[in-house]
C-alpha cells in the first residue's frame, strides 16, 4: 500500500484528533478503494473512527444538471457502503454562494490526519496543490485510479512504447485484488450538521436547487451508480469481450465497455476491471490483450502525461516535431471555418461529424474511434490550433461524463500529435496525422451510425442503454 501513498505536507498527526478523515474526490466508491483502505488502516492504528467526506459544489466550471445528476446518483450507494462498514459518512451539497465554503477545513480541524485521492487533473489536482499547505495536520494522497501506481513511473514517457515495458515489469506486483477494509472503532459521533441526505427520489429537486447550468440535461444512456458501472462491466465481459478485438473500432457494433464515465468518477476501479477481464478471459479462452492494453497501458500513459505536465491541457506539451509543423501551417486557409457555437450545436456541413456531436450532447460521450475523427475535424475547421483546442476542451467540460480526465487531455492532444509520429505532410496539419470522411466510410458503417443517432435525437431514448 505504501507505494501508492504520497505525503503532501510535513504536518504531524493531531494527537487529539477525533477521527481520520477520508476526503473522497476522485474515487467515489466504498469498495476496491486503496485510499479508503489506507484511511481505515490509519484509523485502526490510532484507535479512532473513520469519517468519509464527499462533496459537490455549484462553483466548478460549467457545472450543470448532467454532471450533478451523475454524481448524486451514486451517493446513496456510497453512504450505505460506508455506514454499513462502521465508518461515518458526510455528503455536502454546496448549492450557491451563500452556502459555507469551508466545510473541509472545519472537518480537517478535528481530524488526526486527512487522506484523499491522488488524481492529476481538474479540481482534485488543484485542491491537492492548495489544501495540503493550508491545514495543520498530516495530508496523504493515495493513488486508487491506476493499476500500477502512477508515481512508480518516475518520469514523463514519450509514448506507449516507452511506458509499456515499465508497466509490464511492475504489473505482477499490482494486478492483485485489494482486500476489503474494515474499521475497529465504529462511528458513534453525530453526523456533521451540513450533511445533505440524498435519495434517488430527491435528486431532481437537489439538482434544481443548485446555481448551475440547467440547460444540459442528464445523459440518456449512463446513470451514475456503482451498480450500473458493474452492470456495464458484466455486459462487456459476457456479450462484448469476444468481439472486442475485431470490432472495437466499429461504433455501430457496440463492442466497447462504455466504462469511461464510471472510471472517471471512480464508481469502479481500473484494477477491478482489469482483474475481472483477465479472469473471465482465462475462463472462457478469450483474448484480453487488446482490452488490457487500452485499460492499463494507454490509460496510465494519460495519467503519466498529466502527472508530469504543469498544464496537461496545453499545446506546449506536444513533441517538438508537431509544434514545428503546426506552426509552419498556421497561416494555411481554413475553408470552411466554424465558430465554437456552430460546433457545439452540430451545425457543420459534415453529417457524420454532426452525428458524433449529437452523441456527445445526448449520451455524454462519443465512441472512441469517432472521437478521433471529431477532434481532427475541429482542428481542420477552426481558425487556429488554439481555438480548436479550446473548443474541444469546452465541449468535453460541458457535455462529457468522461471529461476533465487525464484521458480527456491526452486524447485531445493526440489529435495534434501527442504520443503519435509524423505522417505525410498536408495543408493545415503539416505532418500531424489526418483523418478523412472517406476513411471513416471505408472502415466503418457510417450509415448505421447515422441512423442510430437520428433515433436518439427523435426519440430521446437510447435502445443500447444497458439495463
Image (cartoon, rainbow, N blue to C red):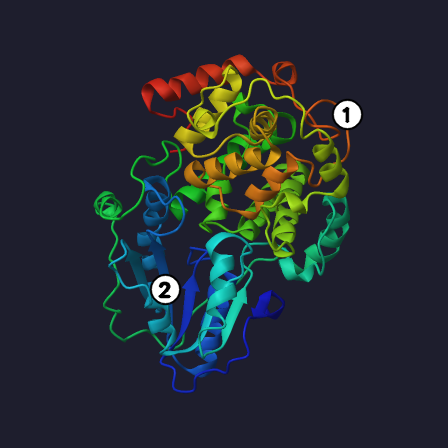
For image coordinates 60% across by 18% down, the residue present is 444
Residue at the image position 64 percent from the left and 14 percent from the top: 438
Location of residue 131 with respect to 214 vertically, above or below: below
Most extreme residue toward the bottom is 15
Residue 32 visible? The answer is no
Quadrant in the picture for residue 112? bottom left
Q: Nearer the viewer, mark 1 or mark 2?
A: 1
Which is nearer the eye, 111 or 158?
158
- Is 39 or 430 nearer to us in this picture? 430
In the image, taking residue 14 as reference, residue 383 lies left or right, namely right
Q: Report the side of 440 relative to 181 (left or right).
A: right
Relative to 449, 444 lies left or right: right
* Figure quadrant of the C terminus: top left
Query: How far across and how far down the image is residue 59, in percent?
Result: 35, 52
Query: Quick check: 71 above or below 130?
Result: above
Count of number-bearing discs: 2
Q: What residue is disc 1 on?
A: 425
Of the numbered discs 1 and 2, the one sitting upstream in the chain is 2
x and y percent of residue 154 in the render?
71, 61
In this rendering, does residue 109 appear at all? Answer: yes
The quarter of the displayed image where residue 96 is located = bottom left
Vertical relation: 379 (above or below) 210: above
Under tag 2, what secondary structure?
strand
- Say the numbered circle drawn on residue 53: 2
**Residue at the location (70% across, 58% down)?**
153
Give the image location of residue 300, x and y in percent: 63, 49
In the image, residue 285 lies at what x, y percent?
65, 37
Residue at x 42%, y 36% (from the top left corner): 399
**Disc 1 and disc 2: Cα gap in Å?**
52 Å
Quadrant housing residue 43: bottom left
Amino acid at each position: 500500500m505504501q507505494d501508492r501513498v504520497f505525503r503532501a505536507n510535513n504536518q504531524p498527526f493531531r494527537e487529539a484528533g477525533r477521527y481520520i478523515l477520508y476526503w473522497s474526490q476522485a474515487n467515489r466508491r466504498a469498495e476496491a478503494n486503496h485510499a479508503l483502505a489506507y484511511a481505515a488502516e490509519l484509523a485502526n492504528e490510532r484507535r479512532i473512527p473513520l469519517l468519509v467526506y464527499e462533496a459537490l459544489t455549484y462553483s466548478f466550471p460549467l457545472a450543470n444538471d448532467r454532471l450533478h445528476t451523475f454524481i448524486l446518483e451514486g451517493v446513496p450507494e456510497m453512504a450505505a457502503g460506508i455506514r454499513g462498514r462502521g465508518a461515518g459518512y458526510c455528503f455536502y451539497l454546496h448549492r450557491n454562494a451563500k452556502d459555507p465554503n469551508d466545510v473541509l477545513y472545519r472537518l480537517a480541524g478535528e481530524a488526526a490526519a486527512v487522506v484523499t485521492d491522488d488524481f492529476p487533473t481538474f479540481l482534485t489536482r488543484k485542491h491537492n496543490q492548495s489544501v495540503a499547505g493550508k491545514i495543520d495536520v498530516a495530508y496523504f494522497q493515495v493513488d486508487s485510479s491506476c493499476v500500477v501506481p502512477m508515481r512508480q513511473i518516475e518520469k514523463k514517457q514519450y509514448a506507449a512504447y516507452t511506458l509499456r515495458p515499465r508497466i509490464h515489469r511492475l504489473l505482477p506486483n499490482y494486478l492483485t485484488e485489494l482486500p476489503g477494509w474494515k474499521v475497529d472503532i465504529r462511528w458513534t459521533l453525530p453526523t456533521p450538521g451540513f450533511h445533505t441526505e440524498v435519495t434517488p427520489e430527491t435528486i431532481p429537486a437537489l439538482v434544481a436547487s443548485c446555481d448551475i447550468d440547467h440547460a444540459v440535461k442528464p445523459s440518456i444512456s449512463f446513470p451514475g451508480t456503482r451498480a450500473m458501472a458493474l452492470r456495464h462491466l458484466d455486459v462487456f465481459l459476457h456479450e462484448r469481450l469476444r468481439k472486442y478485438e475485431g470490432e472495437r473500432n466499429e461504433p455501430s457494433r457496440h463492442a466497447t465497455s462504455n466504462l469511461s464515465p464510471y472510471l472517471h468518477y471512480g464508481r469502479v476501479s481500473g484494477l477491478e476491471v482489469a482483474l475481472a477481464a483477465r479472469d473471465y478471459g482465462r475462463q472462457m479462452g478469450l483474448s484480453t490483450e487488446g482490452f488490457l492494453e487500452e485499460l492499463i497501458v494507454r490509460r496510465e500513459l494519460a495519467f503519466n502525461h498529466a502527472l508530469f505536465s504543469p498544464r496537461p491541457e496545453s499545446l506546449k506539451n506536444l513533441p517538438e516535431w508537431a509544434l514545428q509543423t503546426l506552426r509552419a501551417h498556421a497561416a494555411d486557409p481554413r475553408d470552411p471555418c466554424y465558430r465554437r457555437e456552430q460546433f457545439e450545436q452540430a451545425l457543420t456541413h459534415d453529417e457524420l461529424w454532426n452525428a458524433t456531436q449529437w452523441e456527445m450532447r445526448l449520451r455524454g460521450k462519443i465512441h472512441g474511434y469517432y472521437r478521433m475523427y471529431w477532434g481532427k475535424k475541429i482542428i481542420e475547421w477552426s481558425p487556429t490550433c488554439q481555438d480548436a483546442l479550446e473548443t474541444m476542451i469546452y465541449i468535453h467540460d460541458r457535455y462529457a461524463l468522461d471529461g476533465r480526465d487525464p484521458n480527456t487531455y491526452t486524447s485531445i492532444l493526440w489529435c495534434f500529435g501527442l504520443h503519435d509520429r509524423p505522417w505525410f505532410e498536408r495543408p493545415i496539419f503539416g505532418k500531424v496525422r489526418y483523418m478523412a470522411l472517406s476513411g471513416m466510410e471505408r472502415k466503418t458503417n457510417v450509415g448505421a451510425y447515422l441512423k442510430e443517432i437520428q433515433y436518439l435525437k427523435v426519440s430521446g431514448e437510447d435502445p443500447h442503454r444497458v439495463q
